[in-house]
Image (cartoon, rainbow, N blue to C red):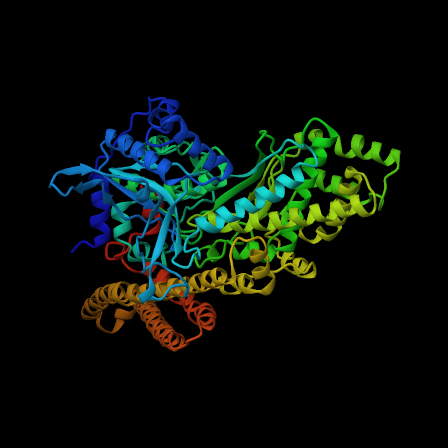
Amino acid sequence: MPTLRFHALKETLKRSYPKVNETERRSELFGNNVFNKNTMIQYLTRDSYQSVVDAIEQGTKINRSMADQIAAAMRDWALSKGVTHYTHWFQPLTGATAEKHDAFFELMDNGYAIEKFGGGQLVQQEPDASAFPHGGIRNTFEARGYTAWDPTSPAFIYGPTLCIPTVFVAYTGEALDYKTPLLRALYAVDEAATAVAKYFDKNVKKVNASLGWEQEYFLIDSALMRSRPDLVMTGRTLLGHSPAKGQQLDDHYFGSIPSRALAYMQDLEKECMLLGIPVKTRHNEVAPNQFELAPIHEETNLAVDHNSLVMDVMDKVAHRHHFKVLLHEKPFAGVNGSGKHNNWSLRTDKGVNLLRPGKTPMSNLQFLTFFITTIKAINEYEELMRAGIASASNDHRLGANEAPPAIMSVFIGEQLTAVLKELEGVTDGKLSPQEKTDLKLNVVGKIPEILLDNTDRNRTSPFAFTGNKFEFRAVGAKANCANPMTILNTIVAKQLKEFKIAVDVLIDKKKLKKDEAVFNVLREYIKESKNILFEGNGYDPAWPKAAAKRKLSNNRTTPEALKVKITKKTLDLFSEMQVMNEVEMLARYEIEVEEYVKRIQIESRVLGDIARNHVIPTAIKYQNMLIHNVSGLKKLYDTSFKQYAKEQLEIIEAISLHIGTINAKVSEMIAARSKVNKLVDLEKKAINYCYEVKPFFDAIRSSCDALELLVDDELWPLTKYRELLFTR
């Protein structure tokens, strides 16, 4: 009887796949399903339009009267598009998005029906949502949670539903989502960066943090996916022998996009255009069936919303093309995993990128100020940056010869390193006229020329400067960008705040001129941040030892990495910057530790199930076939049968050994899991799952993979790597 695997392969081969016509202009599609400024101009009065613009640009509140007008306009626009429902769209601490659909439909007292949507429904909802992770913030019997409209991220139509981006908070006001702390962090960095930017341009009124994410992913045929219980349940293959050919020929990276994948991409990009997601780049990634999608950079809050939305859209579009999108950071052993590079910068309301050198020494001094202050922030909080990208799935990817290591460091290139070395020698206190001239002409003034040739990309660096932005390369593919971006913007805000205090002290007390004071503070920051700068190979076996000498952390696992989130230094940071209070921080720590436990627990259960219910029975079935063959040879050759059945007997013995190893290790793993499950302390449970349960995975997998090479291919029940990675 054919296995599920062969049914899946047959289903894949006989399918016809949708083709997409990519002739429509992107500019004509872009934002058609978004209640953006262009749409608002058509549907809102002048006053209500201005109230939304003021809320977006200045953070002012929208009064109830205006909210009613805006809601009515949204409703009319949505109805004109055939929409029937609305939802408050938010990002709970599950890593996914959430929505509860309500119809516009209402019954009047006289029995007549109307389409109703008012300001109260727009501004605030009470979805309850008691089952979402809350880390002890809410009791089940006190589970009220509220969603509140975020006007800085425009409403959009997704299917038959008007989606309104919102924050999600508890009855007591604590954040229960990713968006609320992010908005607070963006406010903090805006306030701190604007104050510093005024040293160079007094007309600056606002600074926005920008983000450009690069989303890597795998496309796997949906039928083949269904034949792999591990992929279905965990998002990654818990066993499977590497194919003879993987990525070693480098023939997939930037190669011609397979036609079926291209049709999917075209369909996906059209959906993105309608939703106002400015996707621009698509290409093959390093591993077979791995691809990348990247947009134009946007304001961080909107970019985070768009990335959260695009991960959902990717999955829905994939269904139409009989694909399954894999966003797990390491779905296949032996080939590259997937990341989500976060490209970050700061931009003023005058359109100036604060991390891009300008045409004058003063604008270059501005660049150096924000450049060096960011490096100092990473140096002070490198362990927290590592915690911001910690997860059970990303642990498989970090440092695996394809992604940055778990040691946080900053790459800036040889040329900028030389510039910092020059600045390090700045005289303490007042500068002589000659020193000022040398600095401005020979060091600061030449930065733009230096950067023209500074195009190096260190793929092993977790945090690299790439000409006009920093690229946080260690973020995992399925992560919500808000988590690392909240941390990054908070620590930069903190450092900018301290920078301004230090500069003002030198100006007021030591009577230094502004540029002298700036140079003096930057010099000290350079000296204090040397340890975080690393230009070498992050995969070099010598780097961990060298990093330890620099006193850099190397938290290789999630339980180790997350501990920093509840240290006094971290709690004080988020409290001072008014991003999260202690209750919110402790809740997030508990949620993330508990998620780690659950993920390893699930993987353990799935692996045990596959090993005993799929692999072992298949191996026994094939072993019985060999035994039957040997019995026939014995009847035929009697005493000399061993001469003719030597190989069969060796395979029978090998199968028995592997079956015995698998069964024994699964039993030991279950016993270890039962012991760990009795632990009450969540932190201890996570550590024990990491070090007492997870190590069994490799031993079980090794014997399962060995059996895959021994057992008849037609009997093997699980779709193999060569089929998953090369079926297109």
Query: Whole-percent x and y of residue 481?
Result: 47, 47
Q: Residue at x 70, y 34 (%)?
A: 200
Image-quadrant location for residue 603: bottom left
Residue 580 to residue 124: above or below: below
533 vs 431, nearest the viewer: 431
Q: How many marks?
A: 0
Query: Whole-percent x and y of residue 688?
Result: 45, 72
Image-quadrant location for residue 686: bottom left
Q: Residue at x 77, y 41 (%)?
A: 519
Q: Is residue 320 left or right of residue 487?
A: left
Q: Locate the N terminus by quadrant.
A: bottom left
Q: Locate the C terminus by quadrant.
A: top left
> Would residue 402 be visible to someone looking at this image?
no
Residue 88 to residue 626: above or below: above
> Would residue 226 be visible to someone looking at this image?
yes
204 vs 547, nearest the viewer: 204
Query: Whole-percent x and y of residue 715?
Result: 24, 57
Query: Whole-percent x and y of residue 675?
Result: 39, 78
Image-quadrant location for residue 295: top left
Q: Residue at x 68, y 58 (%)?
A: 546
Residue 707 to residue 66: above or below: below
727 vs 479, nearest the viewer: 479
Q: Is residue 358 left or right of residue 149?
A: right
